[in-house]
Image: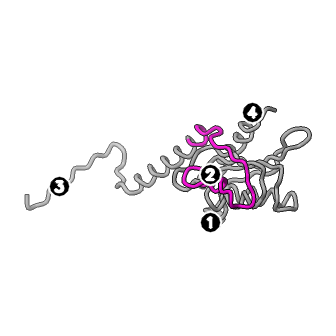
Amino acid sequence: MDPQAQDEWAMRLALDQALNAQLVGEVPVGAVIVRDGAEGPQLLATGYNRPITTHDPTAHAEIVVLRHAATLLGNYRLPGCTLYVTLEPCAMCAMALMHARLARVVWGAPDPKTGAAGSVVDLFADARLNHHTAVQGGVLADACGALLREFFAGRRAAQRAAREPMIPAGEAREIDPPASI
C-alpha cells in the first residue's frame, strides 16, 4: 500500500472511532495506532475521546489509544508505530506521543485554539526535546473538520433551544400589554 493510501485508510478508521465518541456524547475525536509489519500495516489499537464518560480530563483519544497499544505490547515505547488522530493534538497529547517514541503522528483537522503540532505551538519541532516524531497534518482534513463543526453546531442549537421558551407548534400567543399603556 502506498503511503498516501495507508494514511487515508488509517484516518478513515480514526473517523469511525470519532463517530463512536459522538454516539456516547463526547467530542468526536478518534485515534488509531498502526504498526509497520512485514506484510503491510497492522492495526494495533483504537480509541476515542472519553473525558466526559470517564470523568478523566486526560482521556483524550490519543491517550486512550496509547494506553491500549502499550498494554498490548507490554511496553510504553511504540517505535515503528504511527498514530492517526482526527484532530491536531493538544500539548498534553503531543508530549505523551513523543514520550511513547512513535515514529509518526498524522492528524486530520487543525485545532486553532489548542493545537500543539503547528496551529498554536509546535512542540514536535522543538529541537531541545530528546525525541523527534515526524508529523503530518491535514489528512482527510475536510471530513475530520466537518464532523467536529457539525457536532458543535448541534450542541449550540440544543443550548439555544433550551434557553428559549417552549411554545407548542401551531399555538401562537399574544402577550397582553401592561395595564399602564
Mark in front: 2 vs 1: 2
Q: Name the residue under label 1.
A: 57
Marked residue nearer the N-terminal end (1 or 3): 1
Return the x and y of residue 160 as percentages of the image width and height: 40, 53
Secondary structure of the residue carrying tag 3 is: loop
Question: Label 4, label 2: how many angstroms apart (C-alpha)?
Answer: 22 Å
The amino acid at mark 3 is Asp
The amino acid at mark 1 is Pro
Marked residue nearer the N-terminal end (3 or 4): 4
Marked residue nearer the N-terminal end (4 or 2): 4
The amino acid at mark 4 is Ala
Question: Label 1, label 4: how many angstroms apart (C-alpha)?
Answer: 33 Å
Q: Name the residue under label 4.
A: 5
* Mark carried by residue 163: none
* Residue closer to the observer: 14 or 140: 140
Mark in front: 1 vs 3: 1
**Magenta span main SS:** loop
Secondary structure of the residue carrying tag 1 is: loop
The magenta stretch spans which residues?
A: 116-145
Query: Seen in the image, is 155 located left or right of residue 18?
Result: left
Can residue 19 be seen by looking at this rendering? no
Q: Mark 3 points at which residue?
A: 176
Return the x and y of residue 56 as percentages of the image width and height: 65, 67
The amino acid at mark 2 is Ala
Return the x and y of residue 138 as percentages of the image width and height: 62, 40
Look at the image and say whether residue 126 sits in the magenta stretch.
Answer: yes
At x 36% / y 54%, what residue is drawn? 164
Q: Mark 2 points at which residue?
A: 117
